[in-house]
Amino acid sequence: MSGTASGLWPYLLLILVGFLPNEIWRALGLVLARGLNEDSELVVWSRAVATAILAGVIAKLILFAPGALAGIPLVVRVAAAACGFIAFLAAKRSVFAGVLVGEAILLVAGFIAGP
Amino acid sequence: MSAPAPNPTTAAVFFAGVKSALTSVFFLVLSGTYIGIGALTHDYGFSPWWLALSSILVWASPGQVILISSLGLGAPAIEAAIAVSLSAIRLFPMVVALLPLLRGPGTRTRDLLLPTHFTSVSMWVESLRLLPAMARNRRIAFCNGLSVGYMATAVAFGFVGYYLAAKLPPLFAGALLFLTPLSFLISTARNAKMLVDRLALVLGLMIGPLLAYWHVGLDLMWTGVIGGSLAYGFQRLREGLR
């Protein structure tokens, strides 16, 4: 794991891999802050790309879970996420209700399934 | 937002922004999200100070989660950088939409540097909601205060999540780690108002794990480009048929 490397290397990675590739879009917005509106085709497409990437990250975190989450069975993780999502829809699109139900199901089912 | 005095000082406006941040619904959202990211940081072996610095410099939770999980899983730096950058494209139209609200007759570009860096979903949604009703010469200070309030929340709860993950029994540590994908899944679904955004979410959920399972290089980049373009193309096709 590169994250466990000691010294300045993780901080250098943070600047080069995290800060700069992220900040460039903000800087570009400052420079070109005219003539683009939220409904322009380029903006719609780039938002779709960003949404799909984020969805890919979400699915990978649930299916190929890191660390302590990997100790909870896959079927419990997927079921908890699905129930949380259904609760979100049922509770008038409340993020709080969805997260609460998803976490509660993960804890109860994870406890029953045992280590 | 009502001003505390007829001619409040810049500091007073700034702190009104901080207060607004700490009493908004995003305070809860950010605390939960950064407790989850703190736990993730712990389990992937980064230091909590590294996370604090990443919250200040990157200041975009999706980018931070991608950074931590891809570097933590040993992905090549260039792949992680591309995935982070693709996830950050959305910041560009957000800055473009925000700056006209902040810019007044006497505004210098350097006054806009901080609000530009601070631009992220929470601050952007609240700014677009609150700024239009406010006098133009107070908006930048308010916006900076709002952002500093949110950023301080993120940094503080990142530490909380990190130390909780280290101390809690495995089941509860697992539940903390689960906060990130769960809250991202649900808040992304809530923000997806157009068909194209909903399709992109569903396609990304399916394509992402498949490409990772097949060990396709640059899997996140392809997930975004394929899933996002398919969703966009489908919406265009449907509009064309109507």
Image (tube, grey):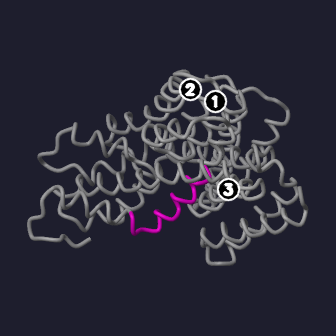
The residue to which callout 2 is attached is A10
First along the sequence among labels 1 and 2 = 1
Residue lying furthest bottom in this view?
A91
| Contact check, label 1 and label 2, Cβ < 8 Å | yes
Point out residue A34 in the picture as x, y percentages from the top left corner: 31, 42
Point out residue A32 in the picture as x, y percentages from the top left corner: 34, 36
The residue to which callout 1 is attached is A3
The residue to which callout 3 is attached is B176
Chain ID of residue with mark 3: B
Q: Amino acid at mark 1?
A: Gly
- Residue in the image at 44% along x and 52% along y: A38
Splitting the image into 4 quarters, where does residue B15 fall?
bottom left
Q: Main secondary structure of the magenta part?
A: helix
In front: B95, or A63?
Answer: A63
In front: B37, or B43?
Answer: B43
Placement of the N terminus of chain A among the 4 image quadrants: top right
SS type, badge 1: helix
| Contact check, label 1 and label 3, Cβ < 8 Å | no
SS type, badge 3: helix
Disc 3 packing (10 Å; few <14; some 14–19; many ≥20): many
